Image (tube, helix red, strand yellow):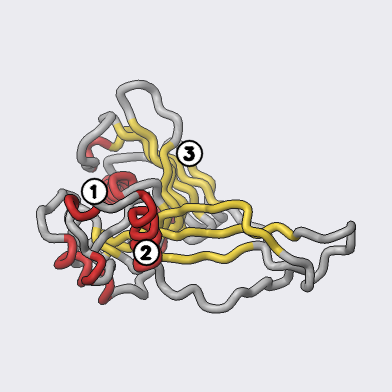
Amino acid sequence: MVVSSAAVAQDDELSTAEREALSAKAADRQARRDIESLLKPSGKFERGMFIVLRGTTLETLPYATSYPGLCQRDELGVDYAPDPANGRPVDANTPLRPYRLRLSTSFSLDRRRFRPMRMEQTQRDRDAGCIANEQGETFFAPDEDAAVAGYTALQSLAARLRAGSLTLSACDAEKGTSCTQVVLGVVSPGHLGQIQACPAVPGTRCLRIDADNSVGITIMIATPEGAVTPESISSAKVETYIIIT
């Protein structure tokens, strides 16, 4: 997980030399203070529908990536396990112990400012735009490069479908709805749920994009790396599904 240093309090902005000069104990204390300074207030513990609290989540303020208009935030989850004494039944009064951390990364994308190319700018200046748009819709991806590749692949696929220059290799949509309509209906960032890699033959790429909790789009890209363009889309398939909770 990569985190921005822009949110660290001014009096904690020590230089590399100053940090290297700290004793082991002071370095540990400083590192923990740095982590805490990046996290937003967590709010109250809530167990929801469960008998005992299962976990809580802390998150950072959104911060800028290397790509203009793409912001990232990191989530740190803490899971708890009940620790009953003398075999007593587990209930809301049973002591809990933290036993595991969970890390995840989410992104938000401003189409007006987004550029699929890395830009040099100070972290503090770029972060300002992300914090100003903190309430934007987010989606999950392994890292910023995967987020950009997935979003640009979806836009490239949409361009091919609009032009009629690509036919979907497989289509599973509700009766009366075309898969082209399904794809074009989820191209804006607010519809994205998750972007992840999928198996591909050597020399190519595969990206799986889940949107609106109901659409899965698999896109095959003819180039193993670099920018995704409409011409590099070799095939795609669409499936729709229902999540039962």
Mark 3 sits on what residue?
170
Mark 2, other Cα within 10 Å: few <14 / some 14–19 / many ≥20:
some
From the viewer's side, name the closer residue of 220 and 163.
Answer: 220
Residue at x 30% of width, y 23% of height: 203
In front of the other: label 2 or label 3? 2
Task: Tell me which numbered mark, 1 or 2, is placed earlier along the sequence.
Answer: 1
To which residue does mark 2 refer? Answer: 33
Q: Residue furthest top?
A: 202
Q: Is residue 167 left or right of residue 122?
A: right
Query: 11 or 50, which is in the foreground?
Result: 11
In primary-sequence order, the first of circles 3 and 1 is 1
Could you tell me how far apart the alpha carbons at marks 3 and 1 are, in whole angstroms?
56 Å
Query: Does any portion of residue 46 appear in the rendered image?
Result: yes
Q: Quadrant of residue 200?
A: top left
Q: Is residue 231 left or right of residue 141?
A: left
C-alpha span from label 2 to label 3: 51 Å
Task: Find residue 160 and report its horizontal and vertical position in percent.
Answer: 27, 45
Q: Earlier in the sequence, mark 2 or mark 3?
A: 2
Residue nearest the observer in this picture, 21 or 168:
21
Along the line of sight, the residue nearer the viewer: 227 or 12: 12
- The residue under label 1 is 20
The three-letter amino acid code for the residue at tag 1 is: Glu
Residue 123 is drawn in which quadrant? bottom left
Q: Give the image location of residue 242, x and y in percent.
A: 61, 56
Amino acid bearing label 3: Ala
Give the secondary structure at mark 1. Answer: helix
Q: Is residue 184 visible?
A: no
Q: Position of residue 79 (x, y in %)?
A: 61, 58
For the point 59% across and 52% down, the residue is: 100
> Do labels 3 and 1 touch, CB within 8 Å?
no
